[in-house]
Amino acid sequence: MDERQGFGDRLQAAVVATSPLCVGIDPSAVLLERWGLEDSAAGVEAMGRMIVESVAGIAAAIKPQVAYFERHGSKGYVALEAVLASAREAGLLVVADAKRGDIDATMSAYGEAWLSDGSPLSVDALTVSAYLGLGAMDEVIDRAARSGRGLFAVVASSNPEGRSLQEAVTASGRRVEEDLLEEMASRNAAETASTGRSVGSLGAVVGATRTAGSLPLSSFAGTFLVPGVGAQGATPADVGALFAECPTGSVVVNASRSILAAGPTLSAVAAAATALAAELRAELA
Amino acid sequence: MDERQGFGDRLQAAVVATSPLCVGIDPSAVLLERWGLEDSAAGVEAMGRMIVESVAGIAAAIKPQVAYFERHGSKGYVALEAVLASAREAGLLVVADAKRGDIDATMSAYGEAWLSDGSPLSVDALTVSAYLGLGAMDEVIDRAARSGRGLFAVVASSNPEGRSLQEAVTASGRRVEEDLLEEMASRNAAETASTGRSVGSLGAVVGATRTAGSLPLSSFAGTFLVPGVGAQGATPADVGALFAECPTGSVVVNASRSILAAGPTLSAVAAAATALAAELRAELA
């Protein structure tokens, strides 16, 4: 472990300085058309840069959804690299929403791609998916902690189709989502104990549509990335209730459609982000 | 459903014409060095093209592991596009190992990236990960079937860390891996019934390290992509026993390290592939 500040502490500082809002960059074909942009790598890059410019200083982070860049192949990745650079310059934390999930050397290669200082795809945190087991990701978990970066593993998603698997009961007698959260909590506890960081580098994606009390969130000692507000029906108040016992600055709410629908005028996007940021601050202070 | 041949039938034809071998393209830093290639996008592309040239006519398919291309950012994706094009020219089926997994519109964007005629990343099949539920991937499942392409969802992985989640028991009383296989089998059955295809477009990743009899493989009516032979300790005979009841041509075994370690001489790679292909043919005929 070097002397860098950990991702959890960096996120906390960013939330305190701005708000618990993370704005999703989802340049879908539908949204590009609505913004009067071409459905091309250039259009995707333009939208990404516009969102960065609009929400800098209002949101703690942006979350580019990599799928929408990948639609345009390598040119889409050139666009993504440009958007990542512009977000860094604007002082926004960047969470790449890629939901990578593999084992051993392959997972480490994803770590090199997304969580390395010199990489063109370098971000502050990466979303991951643990169907193959969190234990197969050891190296990349260490890399994140060491380099002051974070990982957000999907634990309890906001969509109904994920419930069956996430609520399945393991040999421990607990649900998959509980086991995963507990495994991550124990790694966060070890990290905070050994580094003096107040929040660990492992984050959990927990949908705002989940029920308060169904998961041991207060002892997590890591960060939470929360989808499901707006389009999927949850409210800022739901988030406030769900994470009531969690430290200020450990929770960021991702919103995309509800904010981007206000575009393409930058001031309108900023106004929509400002309004949601204020609501979230009130619930999560 | 248009008149295209389905992926299952295409894979079956390729296996019959060549072998049940799928060669993984895993241009890791370690392997690049061993082959005397630079750890750069150019090195990754060179290795990919060399593998394609070596195994065309011997293997049914190649499986580029996207993580190793992504290490080099957008330039790595340019290299990947070049390797995909060279594989198409060589008549190899291409399975992109990307383990994408998301919901709704985001998942559809992955479908547009990987399973579309005009896309630079167009492949024959894509690996996916269903932590968020297979039901959240409806559109991309339909897209695959419609366009003569396939999806391989990870069901029972070859690594030990995945067991806890994959064996967790759902509300149906079955294990996660059984539920997923059954859900896919029923979609494959519907597809074959409505199209006259003999094998459905949905494939399952099932590790060769799994025990025969532990999963209902014979009624799957789709394809299987099988890792775990060689490096992870399983043998061609294990694969033969595990898939004894499955139709010829519905199973392909992925091998990478055991074949690529023979390089960099193309003839040595071809010889290693030929030897394994013969063993697999003997077990899976």
Image: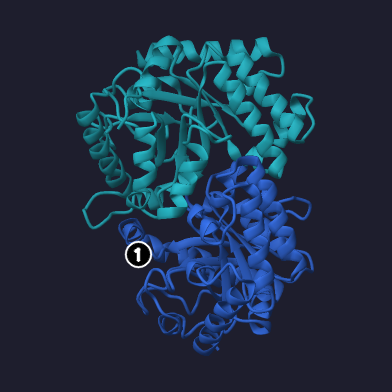
Chain colours: A blue, B cyan
Q: Which residue is mark 1?
A: A174
Q: Is residue B18 visible?
A: yes
- Choose between B45 and B268: the one closer to the eye: B45
Q: Pinpoint residue B78: horizontal percent, then vertical percent.
A: 68, 35
Q: Is residue A76 left or right of residue B242?
A: right
Q: Pinpoint residue B71: horizontal percent, then vertical percent.
A: 69, 43
**Quadrant housing residue A169:** bottom left
- Choose between B10 and B184: the one closer to the eye: B10
- Numbered disc total: 1
Residue at horizontal 42%, vertical 34%?
A: B207
- Choose between B258 and A245: the one closer to the eye: A245
Residue at horizontal 70%, vertical 28%?
A: B45
Q: Chain of mark 1?
A: A
**Quadrant housing residue A198:** bottom right
* Residue at disc 1, secondary structure: loop
Quadrant location, the N terminus of chain A: bottom right
Q: Is residue B159 above or below residue B275?
A: below
Q: Residues within 10 Å of mark 1 (few under 14, many from 20)?
A: some
Amino acid beneath label 1: Arg
Residue at the front extreme, as displayed? A36
Residue at horizontal 49%, vertical 14%?
A: B277
Q: Is residue B198 above or below residue A59?
A: above
Q: Is residue B210 visible?
A: no
Q: Is residue B47 above or below residue A264?
A: above
Q: Is residue A268 left or right of residue B162?
A: right
Residue at horizontal 49%, vertical 87%?
A: A283
Q: Is residue A34 above or below residue B163?
A: below
Quadrant location, the C terminus of chain A: bottom right
Q: Pinpoint residue B127: horizontal percent, then vertical percent.
A: 46, 38
